[in-house]
Amino acid sequence: MMTDAFALYGTHEAEEHPVRLAAGRLSVDLAKGNLRTIRYDGVEVLRAVSYLVRDRDWGTYSPTIDNLWVEQGKDSFSVRYVAHCKGPEDTRLAISVHIAATERELTFEAGALSPTGFETNRCGFCILHPIVGIAGSPAKVEHVDGNVNETRFPDQIEPWQPFKDMRAISHQVLPGISAECRMEGDTFEMEDQRNWSDASYKTYVRPLALPWPYQIAAHEPVRQRIALSIRDTRSGQATALGSTVADIRLEPGERSGTMPAIGLVVTPDEAIATLEARNLLSEIAPQELLFHFDPSAGHGMRALVDFAAVAAISGGRSTLEIALPCKQAPAIETAEIARQMQDAGFRPDAILISPSVDRQSTPPGSKWPECPPLEEVYAAAHEAFAGIRIGGGMLSYFTELNRKRVPADRLGFVSHCTNPIVHAADDLSVMQTLEALPFITGSVRAIYGDKPYRIGPSTIPMRQNPYGSRTMDNPSGRRIPMANRDPRHNGRFAEAFALGYAIRILDANIECLTLAALAGPFGLIAGKGEPTDEGGNRPLFKVVKLLSSLAGSPWSNCISSRPSELLAFVSRQSSAATLHIVNLTAEEQSIDISAFRSASQGTSMALAPFGTASIKLAV
């Protein structure tokens, strides 16, 4: 079995390994000049402290780091460097950094200076709090005016900023251990990053209500400082609380449900390639095909004719996803699409309709774009597509659905997508987004109750950018945020991510889950020079085929001793039960499965990096 980096990630470019620094019980990972996984006594206190510079499309600069100096002492450490960003028209920005730590205190100071002036949407610190064990727990927020507010981290995902005008925030890490994060040099506020499937609450500099992009003036320094203080009132506790045994233990859980239908997305550009791969389509046998139709992008009769041909060779249902232009009255536009559908001989089982402008995000302080009322859009759809099930929601992400709640009374289902590379694209951040999915589905259920609910297409590469003018081209196959192509989609990383995704959303009783296309950059068919599975397809093919074969069958959950590293569930078909396991890490994992009676396995097993396994259980 291939285990080289190319097989895992679809690229030969290796991620830079972080440097572990420690000051007594305090430890951090230094990666590209920023701090990740900040722990005290082995327990994560903060997920990250980073100094970030964003461009006018909210893309994140990858600065060049010079004069890096790291000193690791016995009970302290210190880091210094200068980071350089180069913007359009040879504009430049330099950031001088000093990081220092003792066991109970961590400081991160930065001074930015531009010789040319520099345009940015955001320049400054970003602090991430983890969500597992933190969501819904108490917090104390000190505001810039000195007032202190006793509050809580949001449990259900907050659509807007839960905390504004921040100077400091404190929380309990564990009984007897508390942490205060103090932010100086500007006004900070927090957003609930679970909206974008990030596994964090993000406290960031410069309120979004202020104009952006903005200009950093030439020769005017911008200084900021973050100070993390730990208070430990325990006595006589010397063992690291975050230590773990070598083996990850799996045990049967008590929750159960029915596996969702599996869909594949088909765009006009990929319809012919999908037709040509009909044998693979039959092999996967998806329960749903989601056809994307956007008249503003030039989609018309030709696309619908091709969709009809693809639907005819598929044994499953079909949904037409319409991005309605809303340049004319919805009744006129939907009637024209219905006429084209009739002429093309294409009658899908469902319509998913949303105004095209709603794919663009509306940040806090911005005006909602002009758009007909959604009630009018849905009424027009019911009239034009009589007898066809009508769904709504957002063709973009949960963020937009959470901020613009749709009137669901006349909808047959609600839908949204997710994307894991909106804010960060390193391997750890992408895989950690799986932690946010139960919070997303739980929030949707809190808003829409038991309304039928679909998710997707949700892929690692980004198909549209609601937060800027475009997705980012990625011809070199790097790990970059908001990219329309991502090398990991081609490797075993995507296979593990997809199975982990399916496991994380099981509790929400999803009607249909779409994780890929058949062809194209979001597809299951491997391109030239890409890593492949045993059948010559992208490794993701195997997982989508597996999930499709399980659609409609019962599942029961499994409890993992380290769910950030390993997930599992049990499926049941006829009288057979199968334990499905996925390794979410780049390390081989030793797994204790003694709680299950395996028909072909002992009490323990090893699972390769980003590996998946299906083990028949004894009845």
Image (cartoon, rainbow, N blue to C red):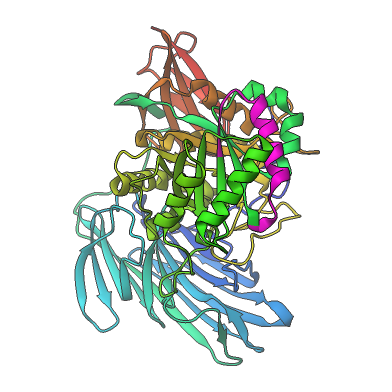
Residue occupying the point 70% across, 55% down:
298
Q: Nearer the viewer, residue 215 or 471?
A: 471
Spot occupied by residue 26 in the image (x, y as percentages of width and height)? 38, 58
Query: Can residue 421 be spotted in the picture?
Result: no
Residue 308 occupies quadrant: top right
Q: Nearer the viewer, residue 396 or 607?
A: 396
Q: Is residue 207 left or right of residue 91?
A: left
Quadrant in which the C terminus is drawn: top left
Spot occupied by residue 30 in the image (x, y as percentages of width and height)? 52, 60
Spot occupied by residue 548 in the image (x, y as percentages of width and height)? 54, 25
Query: Can residue 204 be spotted in the picture?
Result: yes
Residue 301 belongs to the span the image colors magenta: yes
Residue occupying the point 57% across, 78% down:
120
Q: Nearer the viewer, residue 587 or 135?
A: 135
Q: Is residue 470 left or right of residue 31?
A: right
Residue 148 occupies quadrant: bottom left
> Residue farthest to the right?
528
Q: Which residues are magenta?
A: 296-319
Spot occupied by residue 462 in the image (x, y as percentages of width and height)? 60, 52
Q: Nearer the viewer, residue 9 or 417?
A: 417
Count of numbered circles on the image: 0
Quadrant in which the N terminus is drawn: top right
Residue 469 occupies quadrant: bottom right
Residue occupying the point 54% across, 61% down:
326
Residue 307 belongs to the span the image colors magenta: yes
Image: 327 above or below 249: below
Q: Is residue 515 left or right of residue 617?
A: right
Secondary structure, magenta segment, majority class:
helix
